[in-house]
Image (cartoon, rainbow, N blue to C red):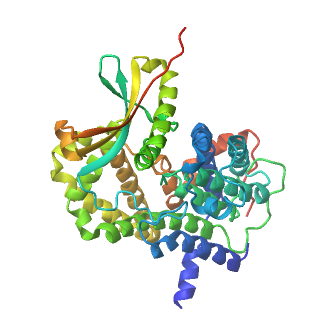
C-alpha cells in the first residue's frame, strides 16, 4: 500500500516541457560555468604532481590513466566537455551526448577538486547533469533534425523532475546532518557561527581575498547569530519537506536562496548554482521560467514539444 | 524508459547522494560529499601559514591566490598549509615559485622579497579590532627581475 502510494507520488505526471526546461537551464549553466572555469582547471593542472590528492572518479581511475595528466590533456577534455554540454543543452543526439557530457563534467570537476581542496560549489550541478543524462529530457525543446517521439515514455517525465528535486534536498539535508554529527546542537549557540565567519574571513584577509561586507559587523556584534544558526540548521534538516508540496517547495527554495545570499554577505563564499536559482528550479514550474528564452530559441529553429 | 528502469535510476542516484551519511563526516568526496563545510566546531584562535610581499621600504603587501598559481583563496590556503609542514627546501621552492610570478606582475613591482609566514591570530579580535597575533617567517626569497 505504502509502495503503491510512493510510486503514485514519484511517478506523478509532469509536462514534458518542464523536464526540457530543466535540461536547458541546468545544461546552460553548466556550459557557462565550465567555460568560466577553464583557466582555473588548467592552472591547477600545472601544480606540482605531489599536490595531487585524488577524489571520486579520479581516485578510482586516475592512477590507471596516469594522473596527473599532461596539461594539454586536461585542457582538451575540459574543452570537449564544454562542446558536449552545448549539445546536451540543445538536446542534440541526446542519448549519446548527454552521458558523455555528464562523464566529462564529472571527470573535469573531480580533477579540479583533486588538488588538496574539495570545493562544494559543483556537487549539485554534477549530480543534476548525471540525473538528466539518464532521463528522457530531450523529448521537447531541442535543436536538431530528429523526429519528436510520438508518445511519452511509459514512466512519464515527473519522476525525473522529482529525482532532480530529491537530489537538491538530499544535499542540504546532508549538510545539516554533518553539522549535527560534527558539532551537535552546540552549532546553534551563535559562537560557532561567529567563529566560522571570523576564521573564514581571516583566511581571506591573509591570503589576498576580499573580506565579506558584513563580516566585521557580525563578528563585532554577534547578537543575531543564534537566530541565523537556528534558521540555517532548520532549513537544511527541513529540506525534504520541500518535496511534499508546491507551496512548501517555493517557501523552502526562497529560504535556501536567502541563506546563500547571507553566506555571501557574511563570508564572501559564493555558490553560483543555487545563487542564480537553478539548483532550486526542479522544485518549481521551470517551464514558465525558462519558457520565454525557449520560445525565442524555438523561433530560431528549435522544434516543439511532441503533441499529446 | 519504463517504470522499473526509472525506479532503478532514481534509487541508485538518490541512494548515492545520501550514501556519504554512512561515512565519517570529515571523509569528504566529490561529487558525493558529506558537505562538512562550516560544520566542525572552530576555535577562534587560528594558526596558519600565508605568503606576504615585502616592499623596498620594509612594508608588507598581501599576495593574491594567483601568485600561488590558483584563482581560489582556499586552494592557495591548502597549498600554503601543506608547504608549512614540508621540509625547508620545499618551502623555499614554493617561495621561489611565488617570487617568479610576482616578478611578472606589474602591479607588484614595489615588492622585492617574498616571505612565507606562520601566524597565530585570534580571528574574532583580528576582524573586530584589527589585532594581529605573533608571526614567524618560515622562508624568505628575493624577487628577481631582469634588468631592462
Quarter of the rendering containing residue B80: top left
Residue drawn at (58%, 48%) of the image: A290
- Outermost residue on the top side: it is B148
Q: Image check: A117 left or right of B54?
A: right
Quarter of the rendering containing residue A241: bottom left
Q: Is residue B55 visible?
A: yes
Q: Nearer the viewer, residue A181 or B3?
A: A181
Q: Nearer the viewer, residue A6 or B37?
A: B37
Q: Image check: A102 left or right of B147?
A: right
Residue B48 x/y as whole percent:
33, 46
Residue B119 x/y as whole percent:
28, 42
- Outermost residue on the bottom side: it is A1
Residue drawn at (77%, 67%) of the image: A151
| B108 vs A258: above or below | above
Quarter of the rendering containing residue B76: top left
Residue B118 x/y as whole percent:
32, 42
Q: Quadrant of the N terminus of chain B?
A: bottom right
- Count how many numbered circles sit on residues in the image: 0
Residue A264 x/y as whole percent:
36, 44
Q: Quadrant of the C terminus of chain B?
A: top right
Q: Nearer the viewer, residue A3 or B137?
A: B137
Residue drawn at (59%, 62%) of the image: A56
Q: Nearer the viewer, residue A41 or A232?
A: A41
Q: Is residue A238 visible?
A: no
Q: Image check: A8 left or right of B84?
A: right
| B45 vs A214: above or below | below
Amino acid at each position: 500500500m505504502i509502495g503503491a502510494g510512493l510510486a503514485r507520488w514519484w511517478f506523478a505526471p509532469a509536462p514534458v516541457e518542464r523536464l526540457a526546461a530543466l535540461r536547458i537551464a541546468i545544461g546552460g549553466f553548466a556550459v557557462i560555468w565550465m567555460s568560466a572555469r577553464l583557466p582555473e582547471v588548467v592552472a591547477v593542472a600545472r601544480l606540482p604532481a605531489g599536490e595531487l590528492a585524488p577524489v571520486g572518479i579520479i581516485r578510482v581511475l586516475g592512477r590507471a590513466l596516469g594522473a596527473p595528466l599532461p596539461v594539454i590533456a586536461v585542457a582538451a577534455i575540459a574543452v570537449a566537455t564544454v562542446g558536449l554540454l552545448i549539445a546536451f543543452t540543445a538536446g542534440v543526439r541526446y542519448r549519446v551526448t548527454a552521458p558523455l557530457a555528464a562523464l566529462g563534467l564529472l571527470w573535469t570537476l573531480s580533477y579540479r577538486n583533486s588538488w588538496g581542496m574539495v570545493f562544494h560549489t559543483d556537487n549539485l550541478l554534477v549530480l543534476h547533469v548525471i540525473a538528466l543524462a539518464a532521463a528522457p529530457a530531450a523529448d521537447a525543446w531541442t535543436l536538431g533534425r530528429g523526429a519528436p517521439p510520438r508518445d511519452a515514455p511509459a514512466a512519464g517525465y515527473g519522476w525525473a523532475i522529482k529525482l532532480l528535486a530529491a537530489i537538491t534536498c538530499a544535499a542540504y539535508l546532508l549538510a545539516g546532518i554533518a553539522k549535527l554529527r560534527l558539532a551537535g546542537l552546540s552549532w546553534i549557540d551563535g559562537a560557532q557561527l561567529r567563529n566560522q565567519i571570523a576564521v573564514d574571513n581571516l583566511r581571506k584577509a591573509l591570503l589576498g581575498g576580499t573580506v565579506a561586507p558584513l563580516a566585521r559587523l557580525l563578528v563585532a556584534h554577534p547578537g543575531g547569530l543564534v537566530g541565523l544558526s537556528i534558521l540555517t540548521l532548520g532549513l537544511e534538516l527541513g529540506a525534504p519537506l520541500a518535496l511534499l508540496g508546491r507551496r512548501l517547495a517555493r517557501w523552502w527554495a526562497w529560504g535556501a536562496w536567502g541563506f546563500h545570499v547571507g553566506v555571501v554577505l557574511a563570508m564572501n563564499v559564493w555558490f553560483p548554482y543555487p545563487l542564480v536559482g537553478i539548483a532550486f528550479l526542479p522544485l518549481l514550474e521551470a517551464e514558465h521560467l525558462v519558457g520565454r528564452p525557449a520560445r525565442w530559441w524555438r523561433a530560431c529553429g528549435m522544434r516543439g514539444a511532441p503533441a499529446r | 524508459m519504463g517504470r522499473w528502469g526509472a525506479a532503478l535510476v532514481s534509487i541508485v542516484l538518490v541512494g548515492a547522494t545520501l550514501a556519504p551519511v554512512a561515512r565519517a563526516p570529515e571523509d569528504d568526496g566529490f561529487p558525493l560529499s558529506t558537505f562538512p563545510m562550516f560544520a566542525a566546531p572552530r576555535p577562534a584562535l587560528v594558526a596558519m601559514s600565508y605568503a606576504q610581499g615585502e616592499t623596498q621600504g620594509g612594508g608588507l603587501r598581501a599576495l593574491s591566490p594567483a601568485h600561488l598559481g590558483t584563482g581560489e583563496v582556499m586552494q592557495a590556503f591548502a597549498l600554503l598549509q601543506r608547504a608549512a609542514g614540508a621540509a625547508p627546501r620545499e618551502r623555499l621552492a614554493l617561495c621561489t615559485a611565488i617570487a617568479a610570478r610576482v616578478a611578472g606582475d606589474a602591479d607588484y613591482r614595489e615588492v622585492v622579497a617574498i616571505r612565507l609566514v606562520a601566524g597565530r591570530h585570534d580571528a574574532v579580535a583580528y576582524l573586530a579590532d584589527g589585532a594581529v597575533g605573533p608571526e614567524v617567517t618560515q622562508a624568505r626569497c628575493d624577487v628577481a627581475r631582469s634588468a631592462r
